[in-house]
Image (tube, rainbow, N blue to C red):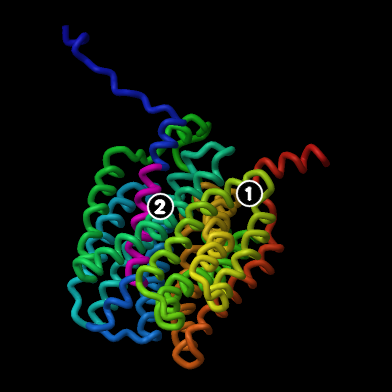
Amino acid sequence: MTTLLKRTAPVVTADRYENRLLVILFLAFGFVFFDRQALAFLAPYMDDDFGLSNSQLGVLSGVLALTWALAGMFAGSLSDRLGRRKPILIAAVLLFSLFSSASGLMTGFVGLLAARALMGTAEGAVLPMSQSLMVEASRESRRGLNMGLLQGSSAGLLGGIVAPVVVVWMADNFGWRTAFFVTIVPGLIIAGLIAKFVLERPPLARREAAEPVKAPKVPVKEVLRLRNVVICMLIAPCYLTWFVTMITFTPTYLTDEKGWGSGTMSAVMTCLGVAWVLWGFATPGISDRIGRRKALVGFTALAVFCPIAVVYVESPVLLGTLMILTYTGLGCFTLFMATIPAETVPRAALATALGVIMGVGELAGGFLGPLVAGRASDIWGLQAAMFIAAGGAALVVALSFGLRETAPAVLRRKGVEA
């Protein structure tokens, strides 16, 4: 009788789990960028309380990048040492939601700076943990696409499309503080989903592991000797300079320099989000077929023109169109921050490599980039920030030629031809 009452636990197939994990991590990293982007869109509303200068806005953006970088490097190394990713990810999601909400309580610049620094400390762990979990659960044929959806399209949809619309609407109707307060709700929901549905070791990894138990530890210095890792570390700060400078100063440039209203600014910034979603999965998906290096060079060359268009194009409709066509860099982020390193380093050192690349990028590009751009803007005008962003992307194009190809399909073709 008892045997009849027993229920067998449902077995999750590898393919089904891959899709489920992608949805959960898509939401998790998307809301990280929703929170990160909120400050840029709320800055014009905060002027009455804080009177933020361009330099202070750059400092607020930079300090988040600084703590994000340090936390990412620490979390990646800790995860590889412990062999655990899920508990770190849950803690990170809960904490970044709490600290983001705390920004709405601050009454001075120093308090806001502290809240942003704490928020970066929590958010820094999310990306290397998510990427490591997703790489291990992905089929080879979908590796680039999955990583692009997770890192690029998620941030574009929630940070680039939803954030400017929701945050600006809430600030207009309920005040900028309320816009910060509501960010805690999705974080709590996502943390619950991770706790319930995410596995420490996915079915695909279990099936493929012929020699499971414990892979030998790989020293960090060995990882740093790999050519692709070194080049990705050099690319990261240049691309972060392009990205963080643009998202930090473009809303203010459109309202202050071009004199556009908050509604027009929000609509144009939403075009960046549309491009972010589109190129976020298209670029890595295309790279699965044509190769990582070709995709990185080609799409980054287009990204050089995006900040230049912000300066010289006067029509909101034309600027929005050009932004959709040239805001291609976010799809490239997945390539140098996740896919190329994942196809280069041993799995036992994966989270460490991802954390180091992200950390170096955030430190040099995410932290120093907006500080330099903010200071340059106070001296020469906001267009200086846009030219700094364009220069960062141009450097990436040059560096990308030094990468060794890692796309499995391309390597197989070369093997057949040889």
Quadrant hosting residue 55: bottom left
Picture layout, residue 54 above or below residue 177: below
The residue most toward the right is 418
Residue 154 numbered tag = none
Of residue 120 and residue 209, the one placed in the foreground of this image is 120
Q: What residue is pinned by disc 2?
A: 129
Q: Quadrant of the N terminus?
A: top left
Quadrant hosting residue 30: bottom left
Q: Secondary structure at mark 1?
A: helix
Residue 64 falls left or right of residue 204: left
Give the residue displayed 37% in from the left and 41% down from the top: 200
Q: What residue is pinned by disc 1?
A: 287
Q: Residues within 10 Å of mark 1 (few under 14, many from 20)?
A: many
Magenta part of the chain: 23-40
Give the residue displayed 32% in from the left and 76% down from the top: 43
Give the residue displayed 22% in from the left and 60% down from the top: 182
Q: Amino acid at mark 2?
A: Met
Is there any visible trace of residue 221 in the rendered image? no
- In the rendered image, residue 410, in percent from the top left (x then y), is placed at 70, 44
